[in-house]
Amino acid sequence: MSHNSTLVVHAGGIRRSREELGRLHTPPPTATWKPVPHGELVSELIKGLDARGITVARDEYCTMGRDDAKLLGTLDLRIPDLDTPEFGMGLGLRGANDRSMSIQVVAAARVFVCDNWAFSGSDGAIFLRKKHTSRLDLSAVVPPAIDQFLERAGAFRLDLERMRGFSLPDGQAKELIHDAFSGPDAVAPLRLFLLVSRLYFVDEEQRARFPDRSLWSLNNAFTEAVKTLKHCPQHAAGLRVGRMFGRILHRARTPVQPIGVVDGIELN
């Protein structure tokens, strides 16, 4: 399984191991503000995941700023009864002990975190956001946030299954590829047009991996093409591609009323 999360460090961040985080300085609290040691934040998050049977396959971190006040990190997860060879989930986290921002954790099938402060996931949502108030108790807020994350992960997996079952005639696939690269709503650079087409219609290796002519196979052709871009444009294009396929699924699930029906009432 490929990595589900990417941490890019190129704008002054310092890569840190999980063990190093536990040795970094944390400023003292005040009556209304409570900094959270970086090591404690990561430890509580992993403890909450472990309590739900979720293991961390790979994690990366970096710190920034004076006294390493800012923390960024990514975690690739393994979730029993949810993962498949083509599907997994990742987490991205960030926080700061200099009062510049709250603690935030995002979950998605693909997560991108960068020390230029880019922070997002493919159709992901921030499932944990907490300010450093004096009453902050990570052991109390992390478990329900993990439950919320698992609900989101289940929805992602359901969408994957829907894409697998979405049969795609070649004519429709060609229309979708054309629309993805044309007009103001284009989701990827035009130079990837021929690559996506080749991956979906011609490439023998790709066809062997995804033999069914389905929305899922087309999604993976786009995913492979986008991987040829550099990190930042790759992430931006990946987000747009994910949203495009999400819209296609949404339209497919939305029933179309027949002509002569208004507000559910058949007109004679």
Image (cartoon, rainbow, N blue to C red):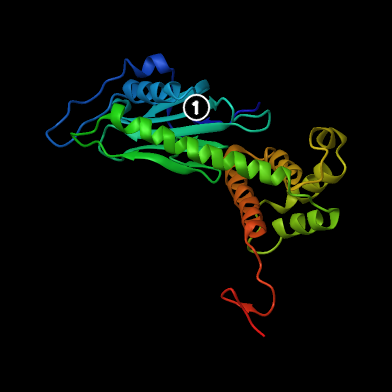
Q: Residue furthest left?
A: 31
> In this rendering, is residue 166 above or below 110?
below
Badge 1 marks a residue whose secondary structure is strand
Measured as percent of width and height from the top left, residue 222 is found at: 71, 45
The quarter of the rendered structure image containing the N terminus is: top right
Residue 18, position in %: x, y? Answer: 42, 18
Quarter holding the C terminus is bottom right
Q: Does residue 201 appear anywhere in the picture?
A: yes
Q: Which residue is mark 1?
A: 75
Question: Is residue 102 rendered to the left or right of residue 179?
Answer: left
Quadrant housing residue 29: top left
Between 13 and 215, which is closer to the camera in this rendering? 215
Q: Amino acid at mark 1?
A: Leu
Instruction: Where is residue 181? Give x, y as percent.
Output: 71, 57
| Residue 238 located left or right of residue 36 | right
Q: Residue at image x 87%, y 35%?
A: 204
Q: Is residue 234 visible?
A: no
**Residue 177: percent from left, percent from top:** 76, 54
Q: Residues within 10 Å of mark 1 (few under 14, many from 20)?
A: many
